[in-house]
Image (tube, helix red, strand yellow):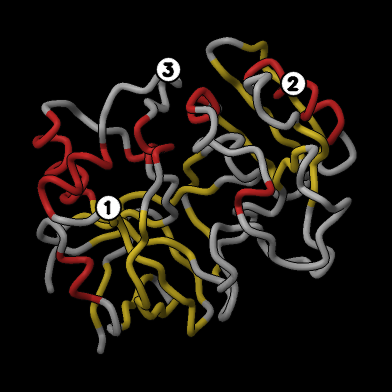
């Protein structure tokens, strides 16, 4: 397929607490996107101190429970592990991870509803893995044309950051990404195999600019297409460097 390219690379160093776009990254076989969901904020009902391995998303503070979190933006420095968080309703916070975890949790508390278990601690897996929504070491691949198609159905532009994806492709037909399951993509010097669709939650209904719920993304998916899936999960099978703007080739 000609004209297919990598339009955006996005990551979320702290699960549900900020998104950012990056220009390039080195992928490792069998691992998710580097510094994507390396940390998460547990709540008081989580039942652990620091998790030994993967834990389900219901153990953490996340946008499903409070859409305002969707408006947090992040700037993360890989070398120093220093993160700056911003939100329309909060002063900016700059913190060193994980040392300044308590300050990050305190910054987050005013955005979290009192009716839910309170934010407790910044946590990371003891085995060094990511705290993504699924236990497999996936990264997510999404399509700009599918996002545009859904936005047209809703009558509004949809920010790509509603979906908390990793790699955004430009040049697919709407929903063609679902047809790539079982296929392998070449991006830069890396190779990725597409394995399954991603089922979505109501966090995607919140606007990442304002944090307010303003689009029934799930209803539009269900009514228009008979499902609530958006994007696909992929596994890195060959390490390599990828850069925004790279051509993408379907190799098998």
Task: State the separation of the CA atoms marked 2 and 3.
Answer: 17 Å
Query: Which mark is on residue 228?
Result: 1
Q: Which label lies toward us, 2 or 1?
A: 1
Position of 71 compared to 191: left or right?
right
Task: State the separation of the CA atoms marked 2 and 1.
Answer: 32 Å
Q: Which label lies toward us, 3 or 1?
A: 1
From the viewer's side, name the closer residue of 81 and 245.
81
Q: Which residue is mark 3?
A: 210
From the viewer's side, name the closer residue of 214 and 38.
214
x, y percent for residue 99: 90, 39
Q: Report crowding for label 1: few under 14, some 14 to 19, many 20 or more residues within 10 A (C-alpha).
A: some
- Quadrant into which the N terminus falls: bottom left
Residue at disc 3, secondary structure: loop
x, y percent for residue 138: 50, 69
Question: Sequence-wise, which precedes: disc 2 or disc 1?
Answer: 2
Residue drawn at the location 22% of the way across and 49% of the way down? 144
Residue drawn at the location 19% of the way across and 64% of the way down? 4
Residue drawn at the location 80% of the way across and 37% of the way down? 44
When the figure is inspected, residue 178 is found, relative to residue 230, above or below; the finding is below
Position of 145 compared to 129: left or right?
left
The part of the image, by quadrant, that contains residue 171 is bottom left
x, y percent for residue 142: 31, 56
- Quadrant into which the C terminus falls: bottom left
Q: Which residue is mark 2?
A: 107
The part of the image, by quadrant, that contains residue 189 is bottom left
Task: State the separation of the CA atoms marked 3 and 1.
Answer: 23 Å
Residue at disc 2, secondary structure: helix
Q: Report crowding for label 3: few under 14, some 14 to 19, many 20 or more residues within 10 A (C-alpha).
A: some
The part of the image, by quadrant, that contains residue 205 is top left
When the figure is inspected, residue 140 is found, relative to residue 193, above or below; the finding is above
């Amino acid at each position: 397929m000609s004209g297919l390219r990598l339009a955006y690379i996005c990551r979320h160093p702290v699960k549900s607490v900020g998104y950012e776009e990056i220009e390039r990254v080195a992928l490792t076989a069998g691992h998710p996107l580097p510094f994507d969901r390396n940390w998460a904020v547990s709540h008081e009902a989580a039942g652990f101190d620091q998790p030994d391995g993967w834990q389900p998303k219901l153990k953490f503070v996340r946008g499903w429970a409070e859409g305002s979190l969707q408006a947090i933006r992040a700037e993360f420095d890989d070398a120093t592990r220093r993160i700056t968080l911003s939100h329309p309703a909060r002063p900016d916070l700059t913190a060193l991870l994980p040392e300044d975890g308590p300050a990050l949790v305190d910054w987050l508390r005013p955005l979290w509803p009192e009716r839910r278990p309170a934010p407790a601690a910044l946590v990371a897996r003891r085995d060094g893995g990511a705290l993504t929504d699924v236990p497999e070491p996936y990264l997510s691949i999404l399509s700009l044309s599918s996002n545009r198609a859904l936005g047209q159905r809703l009558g509004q532009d949809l920010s790509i950051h509603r979906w908390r994806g990793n790699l955004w492709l430009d040049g697919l037909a709407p929903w063609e990404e679902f047809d790539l399951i079982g296929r392998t993509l070449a991006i830069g010097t890396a190779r990725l195999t597409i394995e399954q669709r991603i089922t979505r939650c109501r966090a995607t209904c919140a606007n990442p600019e304002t944090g307010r719920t303003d689009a029934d993304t799930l209803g539009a998916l269900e009514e228009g297409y008979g499902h609530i899936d958006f994007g696909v999960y992929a596994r890195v099978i060959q390490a390599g460097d990828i850069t925004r703007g790279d051509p993408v080739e379907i190799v098998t």
